[in-house]
Image (spheres, rainbow, N blue to C red):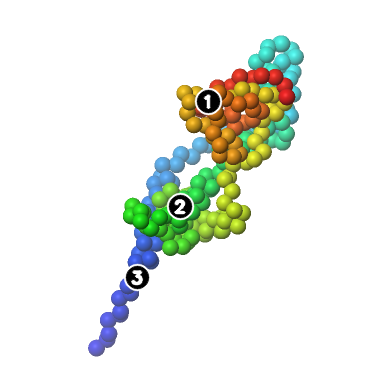
Amino acid sequence: MSRKPRAVHSTPKQQARKSREESWARQDQTAKRGKQVIRRNVSRRNLRCSDVLRALERAAAATGDPVFDDALRALRAYGFDSGGIERAAKRAERDLFYSMEIEYLRQIKWLLERPEKDKRTRRASSVLEAAECVAAESFVRGPSFDSVVERLRKSYAQWQREGYPSGFTTTLTGDLQYKMLVKPVSEQSVPLMPDTSMLPAEGLEQQATAWWRRLFREGAVTLQFLSES
């Protein structure tokens, strides 16, 4: 009589990992089904920033319309003064909004340091487990679940060695020759960058950096240009 093969029982940790991987795979399939492929009949040319600046300078000289001067100042304020437009745009996005990867690393750190008495979420036992949780719950995009987890694990180790930097750039681009008075709207809390102190209700004189332009665009602060510094 032949023996029946012994059933292989997985551990609770292995079951949890499988559940996270399946959750990630379901979200990945949904995202792929809903993805729209945009076909471009004409390839986009990566314009040079210098070409755009010269065009605006020529338009300003020809028309005398100050709107072109405003456009020139805005482009230079956000760093569109060298290289290609696409590279400058990515640099500006990084300066203004910082990488989502930092948010994922913060979530990993939070899971590892979760207070034991807080029963809503169990503290992760390792960086690997925390990375798996974040990959599944936040649906971190990547070629596969394993590759995403490994990327997060390595990024966290590097972030830890660097002392957990905030992720905000400390050299924000801006129209640094100009000063402006920055005031919070409706007395809401507005952080100063790159530190974590708050903008006082009476406002502060600051350089016209992209950080303040971003908050102005979001309606968090008012700006009043003062003079050249």
Q: Where is residue 55 in the image (x, y as percent from the top left)?
A: 72, 22
How would you rate the neighbour count of disc 1 (Cα within 10 Å): few for under 14, some for 14-19, many for 20 or more? some
Q: What element carries label 3?
A: loop
| Distance Cα–Cα, label 3 vs label 2 | 28 Å
Which tag, 3 or 1, sits closer to the chain's start? 3
Q: In which quarter of the image is the N terminus?
A: bottom left
Q: Quadrant of residue 35?
A: top left
Q: Is residue 70 left or right of residue 15?
A: right
Q: Where is residue 54 in the image (x, y as percent from the top left)?
A: 74, 24
Q: Where is residue 146 in the image (x, y as percent from the top left)?
A: 48, 60
Which tag, 3 or 2, sits closer to the chain's start? 3
Figure check: 38 above or below 21: above
Which tag, 1 or 2, sits closer to the chain's start? 2
Query: Which circle, 1 or 2, is nearer the viewer?
Result: 1
Residue drawn at x 35%, y 56% as measured from the top left: 117
Mark 2 sits on what residue? Answer: 110
Q: Where is residue 102 in the image (x, y as percent from the top left)?
A: 54, 47
